[in-house]
Amino acid sequence: MLQGHQTWVFKSRPTIIASAAVGGPHEAQGPLADDFDLLHEDIWLGQDSFEKAEKKLQEQACETTIKKANMKKEDIQFLMAGDLMNQTVPSSFAARTLGVPFLGLYGACSTSMEGLALGSLLVDSKFAKNVLVCTSSHNAASEKQYRYPTEYGAQKPPTAQWTVTGSGAALVTNYGDGPKVTTATIGRVIDMGLSDPFNMGAAMAPAAVDTIEAHFRDLKRDPSYYDVIATGDLGRVGHRIAGDLLKKHGLNIPEDIFTDCGILIYREDQPLVFAGGSGCACAATTTFGHFLNRMRKGEIKKILVIATGALLSPMSYQQKESIPSVAHAVSIEL
Amino acid sequence: MEKFLWAFLVGGAICVIGQLLLDGLKLTPAHTTCTLVVIGAILGGLGLYDPLVKFAGAGASVPISSFGNSLVKGALKEFDSTGPIGVLTGIFQITSAGISAAIIFAFMGALIFRPKG
Amino acid sequence: MSDKKKKKLTPPQLEYQEFAQAREPKRPIVSNCIRAFFVGGFICVIGQGIQMFFVTYFHFSQESAGNPTVAVLIILTVLLTGFGVFDHIAQWAGAGTIIPVTGFANTMASAAIDHQSEGYVLGVGGNMFKLAGPVIVFGVFSAFVVSIVIIILRALGVM
């Protein structure tokens, strides 16, 4: 049901009965490597293009999740998936393989929480018994599309981020044991006029702040309610800006619970990471792998994940448009 | 030996100008190289780039600015020998080797290599 | 250009941009320039060496030796790009690798190699000039304009 202006409260508390995270070599060297179900040695996955490899990542995340739930493809009612590629091709082609009724999504790097929110909505409103939510990103494929060819020698500034090569999937159902999706706040598109595609963090921070404020306002909740509040991929630069902006607006989130998936997924000394991880798979693998694992172990009980997406395209940038962003927040509790 | 020193200093200086365009004016690499090519063309037209090449050797002929200079030189040379049409027929004369080599070897690269990501 | 943009931004947007800029790591301009200087200079020294090699052993003239020199640098760049090494050197060297002809060769080699997955005709052929196109287009057009201007000035007796 609707609470406040833009927040859904899922009274039936849909359960995430299984989830999976798949990653590549860069993720394998990061601190969250143990929370991945599958890690690849290279970014090709035996395919002959990066785009086909990304499709494979989604297939693997979905199939692993279905297996962990002791179900079969045929038991899944709906698949909601999206990615960064033009026309969300990896998601559509993975859906072709899985053969599940499919709803394609686009929220850039906020797709994971957009999917989780919508999937939980379907289950809570009894329009589905189960929904598989998936998203992916591929470093080389997105560099090729959004920025430069992968072997191009441009010098990235310190605000740049490294797109995660990976995929995260979660199965939301109306039965079973597991962390429960309790609320979701849908974000507005915010544009503060920034236009540097090598500084996504600063462009997305205002959207994250807007959604976070809306969440606590709609639910009349205090940030200390949660054990972890994590933004999707603001990175070190955007996360700091968001934290300061929230303080400026009078919303105080304790430093020890406020974190960012882009900061967690890579070590600071990993090459080429700069300000941190980004991409749809950043929030997806960190949440559906690391955070859910910690919840299943009982280490944390209530989390709020605010996935942030930069809604630019290579053409919008060339046409001198700025970068609008959106952020969706989902709370998961035991 | 002196030739090497000047090649180093002038070549390095032109690259520093490029770096300032990249970091200071926040231009993209494409905008930066275009700017330097156009500057090379203008200096070439004014007859100022060739003395730099004589003096600094590869320090002036290796940076992309010399591409602009060569285009202008080629055009004017052909104009002098065959008239106005020479501007069109001569533009690529001097730079033909560089562009052809780039196309041929880039294509061969695509035949042999896969991107590493 | 930035002024034109700033006029279209609202006060909250301007305020936020200043807020964000104050919290961003600045580009290390000085160390970038130093590295660009050394790597760019070094590449030109290599070019000078190759040029002298062609003059001495292959009897090219000082002027015409420029051509095979550029060709050798292009081949080296394609190899380094293909082996996945050039982009790492370039991240460190910045303009030091972009400005010499190595940058031009890298734009073409990297685009060609990346788009091989779309086939040789549309992929490699169609995308090879994706990043090198601007340099050629603007080089040729500015050379055209400059040539016309010089020709007119000469005809007028000014030059």
Image: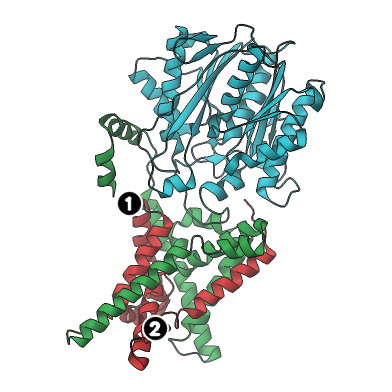
Chain colours: A cyan, B red, C green
Which residue is more in the foreground, A307 or A117? A117
The disc at residue C155 is: none
- Image height check: is B76 above or below A221? below
Which residue is more in the foreground, C157 or C68? C157
Distance between the alpha carbons at the discs numbered 2 and 1: 33 Å
**Residue of label 2:** B74
Quarter holding the N terminus of chain A?
A: top right
SS for callout 1 = loop
**Residue of label 1:** B24
Residue at (45%, 34%) from the top-left corner? A201
Quarter holding the C terminus of chain A?
A: top right
| Residue B9 shows up from this direction | no
Which residue is more in the foreground, B21 or B9? B21
The subunit letter for the residue under badge 1 reads B
SS for callout 2 = helix
Q: Where does residue C85 sit, x and y in percent of width and height? A: 59, 58
Q: Where does residue B49 sit, x and y in percent of width and height? A: 32, 77
Which residue is more in the foreground, B78 or A124? A124
Q: Where does residue C157 sit, x and y in percent of width and height? A: 17, 87
Q: Where does residue C92 sit, x and y in percent of width and height? A: 48, 54
Residue at (71%, 48%) from the top-left corner? A44
**Left or right side of A137 for C91:** left
The subunit letter for the residue under badge 2 reads B
- Image height check: is C122 above or below A36? below
Which image quarter: residue C40?
Answer: bottom left
Which image quarter: residue C9?
Answer: top left
| Residue B114 shows up from this direction | yes
Both labels 2 and 1 in a single chain: yes
**Left or right side of B64 for C10:** left
